[in-house]
Amino acid sequence: MNSLFCCQIASAGFFAVIFFADTLKKHLPNRRTIFFQLFLCFMMLSSVFAIFADLGRMYGEPGKLHEVIYGTFLFLQLITCLMLHCYILSVDYRLHFRLSVDSVAGWRAMGGCFFLLIASVMLLSSPWTHLCFYTNDSGLIARTPAFWGVNLILLGMFLYDIGVVWLRCLKFSMRKRMMCMLLVVDFIAMLVAELFRMPGTSFFKVATLFFAYMFYLSLQSPDFFVDNATGTFNRNGFFEIFQERLSYGKETSCLIIRVRNYQAMNQIYGGEVLRKVQRRIAGLLVEKCGKGGVFHIGSSTFAIISKSREGTLALYEKLKEMLPQNWVLKNQVVNQEYSFYEITYPLDGEDFEELVQRIHYARSDHESVHKSGELVHLRSDEMEKSDEKREVASLVEEAIMDDSIELHFQPIFSFAMGRITSLEVLARLKDRNRKYINPEFFIHVAEENHTIIQLGEQIFRKACIFASYNHIFDYGIEDININLSPAQCRYEHLTEDFVRIANQYGIPMEKMHLEITESEFTDKDAVSRTLARLKETGAKVALDDFGTGNSTLSNILELPVDFVKIDKSLVWSFAEGKNQFLNDLMPMIKAEGKKIIAEGIESPDHIDIIKKLQGDYLQGYYYSRPLPEKEFLRFLAKFNKKGKDGKEKASSDIKEALG
Ligand code: C2E
Ligand code: CA
Ligand code: CA
């Protein structure tokens, strides 16, 4: 046994150990990893066949068997070369499999396949055809020009790889590029040494493997992609797979699942308990989607990659039902909610960086913006909308903390009294550019956020302070209309709080009129309970925005309301002759013993109409827009002193009042 042969055995053993050790690790199911493992595998196999070939040469009879083994060895080496080539190209996502006649890459791929097929046939058939090698008279294997031709082409392939690495993989650091170059150069050296039967073949072989492994680990070791807490892949793994799929132009859809209130749970129950929660969710997801597709991309966030949007939508339907609604944590049942996000390439965008931005968005907290259980499509306009919502949500929170919500007041004119007897309190909030935000928008955000409870209380208190500080009832005002959001009605202590605040500023609850808007989403029970309780304290209730489609006549009958506010749209369309509803509606409401306030009064015509229909109160820009405190008081003083007959005199009064 010569020393070269010992080296062959040692290197084959070494490859086997490396290959099996690497197989035991958890691997990302991407091209790069797959080709690296195939490379290791074929390197090992070709080493084993190299031993057989050597054994045959040393001890066997020259003959067919020896040639078959040698041919197989050459074939395996060809495949090893190919795997290394594929691995190098896949590192930078340049390994396209598309066979087509209309692209350069397609032609190249077809040419490659053709060459591979011919070379394989030539090598494997050589024991019979002697195309690549034959046994010469001295019993040794000799190579034909065709053999050298095949190897020359392989050499060209590796030179091409070197070019690719050097010119294209610019995102790699210099160290990585050098390592990759060394790998290829060393591989070439190994081939050359073997072809010319020079000493040192085994040395180059081991060195090749060494460089390959170093390069592979320097890119990222398998551990880099694995999340130890759950055993699934982590964020790095997710982005690696995502980027690879995008680079190859494959349709890719992600479902992102976020456990809500995770921060709070973490603070209450501690990290260890929550890791159990993570493990259980991961287990459930893996059960549903298989190990390769589940990624733990943030402490409370999981992602699942599907091949199409339909797959993601179907998965969402399943998971929505399947994920547990409660956890038992430290003997306490904790209600659990989830947020779901969806994004699909190329449907929602083709730019990797932008899609990643949106995925990062889904990883952070947007509980205030998105409802629990709902699937949010991460389109760019959705993102802008929710960014805006988030901004407004934080402005609302700041206003609550700083007690800085502003109030404007809009007068309400009474036909019976011929003066302003009431006012509506309207909340105002400015954005960072000191511009007013649409109140409907910030109120809606506060409702979704549940900050409406504190905001509503602040508005109520400020309205009481305004009334008491300015002795508003001395101006002829009889009551104050304050908007009440249905979301506030879910708060149990609302009535007590309002009574306490009104008492504190000496405002009788009888003066307080609460305007409520019905919608399809309102919790009807909570609203009627709260309104009943408010009425017990003496407060009055108005049904707001009547005629906007959400409220019906049955609301008026069901709810204990004293006033009905006819929405401006109904007044305007009636005035334009577009409908006749008010003709029937107003008498019906009056027959129920409710008073009517008409909104959106902008012209004397509107006043006439409501007067004919026997409405009781008028509110609108004809009298005044909602005004800040000082202006409102000035307006009120002038109007109520002079205006005895609203219609005729109001107009001139207003002009005068507003100067
Ligand atoms: P709303 O309760 O129906 O308030 C009446 C809205 O109609 C006000 O808009 C007012 O400026 C507007 N308006 C009054 N007269 C006229 C008119 O003649 N012509 C026209 N074109 N508009 C008129 P604003 O102030 O923008 O408020 C919008 C909505 O925001 C309110 O509708 C209410 O739902 C909500 N909101 C405002 N402040 C509060 C609040 O303090 N609490 C709650 N819960 N909601 C509020
Ligand atoms: Ca209102
Ligand atoms: Ca209204």
Image: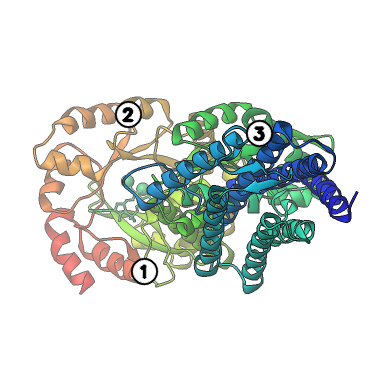
- Label 3 to label 2: alpha-carbon separation: 45 Å
What type is the residue that disc 3 sits on?
Answer: Leu
What type is the residue that disc 2 sits on?
Answer: Thr
Rendered image: mark on residue 435: 1
> On the rendered image, what quadrant is the C terminus found in?
bottom left
Between discs 1 and 3, the one toward the N terminus:
3
The local secondary structure at tag 1 comes to: loop
Left/right placement of residue 448 relative to residue 602 reads right
Which mark is nearer the camera, 3 or 2?
Answer: 3
Task: Point out residue 658 in the picture as x, y percentages from the top left corner.
Answer: 22, 71
What type is the residue that disc 1 sits on?
Answer: Lys
Task: Point out residue 647 in the picture as x, y percentages from the top left corner.
Answer: 14, 54
Classify mark 2: residues with Cα within 10 Å, few (<14), some (14-19) or many (20+): few
Left/right placement of residue 91 relative to residue 392 reads right
* Residue 239 seen in the current view: no
The local secondary structure at tag 3 comes to: helix
- Label 1 to label 2: alpha-carbon separation: 35 Å
Which mark is nearer the camera, 1 or 3?
Answer: 3
* Residue 178 quadrant: bottom right
Which residue is painted at 21% across and 64% down in the image? 642
- Label 1 to label 3: alpha-carbon separation: 46 Å
For label 2, the residue is 552
Q: Nearer the viewer, residue 289 or 499?
A: 289
* Residue 636 quadrant: bottom left
Between discs 1 and 2, the one toward the N terminus:
1
Task: Point out residue 362 in the picture as x, y percentages from the top left corner.
Answer: 55, 50
Q: From the viewer's perspective, is residue 458 above or below residue 542? A: below
Left/right placement of residue 177 relative to residue 565 reads right
Task: Point out residue 333 in the picture as x, y percentages from the top left corner.
Answer: 76, 33
Q: How many marks?
A: 3
Which residue is painted at 17% across and 54% down in the image? 602
Rendered image: mark on residue 285: 3
